[in-house]
Amino acid sequence: MNNCEYQQIEPLSLPTPRPAAVEEEEEKARRKWEVFPGKNRFYCDGRFILAQQSGVLPLTLGLILVTTVLFFVFDCPFLVKHLTVFIPAIGGVLFVFAVISLLQTSFTDPGILPRATPDEAAYIEKQIDNSGSSTYRHPPRTKEVVINQQVVKLKYCFTCKMFRPPRTSHCSLCDNCVERFDHHCPWVGNCVGKRNYRFFYTFIVSLSFLTAFIFGCVATHLALNTQTINVVFDFSSCTAVELVICFLSVWSILGLSGFHTYLVASNLTTNEDIKGSWSGKSEAEDTGNPYSYNNILTNCCSVLCGPMPPSLIDRRGFVPVEQSSQTVSMEMVLPMPAAKEIKVVVGPTPSQLPPSRALQVPSSPLPATPLSLTGRPQFSCLF
């Protein structure tokens, strides 16, 4: 047909596509805490770390603040007048120690170990496969090392793809391997491990002294009031709230402090004590604690007074370009595939043709009478 014209648009005439990564080059580089694989929350650009399930932490702070405020408002004025002015100072020092150590325990990296990279995980699996067979085998669950002439088993973590170092355990709530893992404490909203155990111990000890001090002061306040006339007026509901909170918490906190004092003196963790790793509670024989120095003072100094180990996760570092390219898709803004664009010039419609051309019907090359498959003619009626 002469009425249709085909025109091809050259691909070189189109604008050159630019990658989206080049257009977003000015975008801020991503830090490692933004792509952290564990179940943690970060604040202040990765400076503070907290467990994902930390809803009990505000309750802990609230109980401490409410009890202390009621003590300073309703009990301290009476005790300062009848006893000594040092009572508010002692209560204030204990309160500051308890709150600061609580915040340090909650927002400090407990000793999280970074997960193995794909290359490191593949290297470990190649080392384990000593037979040289091509079939894939899961790595064994344990590996034995010798510490102070005692055999210690290291477990393989299938989540972090590595053998856990001694005294390391994987927290199921935070989904991280933590060095010298003690336990996951919901009251502080974080795991307790190698880097924040000293803060946790300071918190429970200072809170024990604070609770016992407030309980003793409230009891003294009530005892002195029995010798006065205004007994009913001074025994307010706020004093009753203080007495109930301190009475219910002082025994549990004192017991917890005593238990962790025993652990510090023995250089043990809560996880090791529950499992009975070195006390004969487990199936293994009682071989003694290989981490103990056999001296209470030395054990306490090694646990509480040693240098602060550095954080290994580098949460404020920048993600390398290789890892960033794996986590962020590099999309290219491309046009449609190079294809011929057809421009059809439509001729006049039959109504626009002259009558002489509109009545002309082209001759059909087909026969007037169709043939069947057998070669015989078939007739049909056209209405």
Image (tube, rainbow, N blue to C red):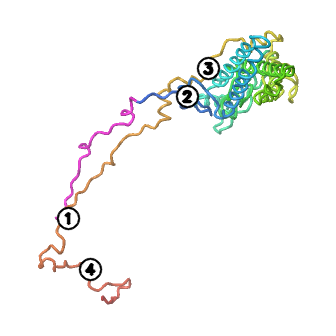
Q: Main secondary structure of the magenta part?
A: loop
Measure the C-alpha gap from mark 2 to mark 4: 77 Å
Identify the image quadrant of the C terminus: bottom left
| Number of the label disc, if any, that sits on residue 33 | 2
Pointers 1 and 3 in contact (CB under 8 A)? no
In what element is the residue under mark 1?
loop
- Assess whether residue 8 is covered by the magenta stretch: yes
In terms of sequence position, does the residue under pointer 4 or pointer 1 come before the other? Answer: 1
Question: Of the residues under marks 3 and 2, which one precedes in the sequence?
Answer: 2
Q: How many numbered callouts?
A: 4
- Residue drawn 67% across and 12% down? 307
Of labels 2 and 1, earlier in sequence is: 2
Q: Amino acid at mark 1?
A: Val
Q: Which range of residues does the magenta coloring cover?
A: 1-26
| 61, 168: nearer the viewer | 61
Residue at (61% x, 20% y) in the render: 311
Q: Indicate the secondary structure of the residue bearing disc 3.
A: loop
Q: Residue beneath label 4, please?
A: 366
Amino acid type, callout 2: Trp
Dividing the picture into quarters, in which one does residue 92 lie? Answer: top right
Residue 1 appears in the rendering? yes
- Give the x, y percent position of residue 259: 82, 22
Left or right of 354 in this view: 183 = right
Q: Secondary structure at mark 4?
A: loop
Label 2: which secondary element: helix
Residue of label 1:
346
Q: Residue at x 19, y 79 (%)?
A: 361
Nearer the observer: mark 1 or 3; the answer is 3
Whole-number angstrom distance, CA of label 4 to CA of label 3: 88 Å
In the displayed structure, would residue 62 be above or below residue 150?
below
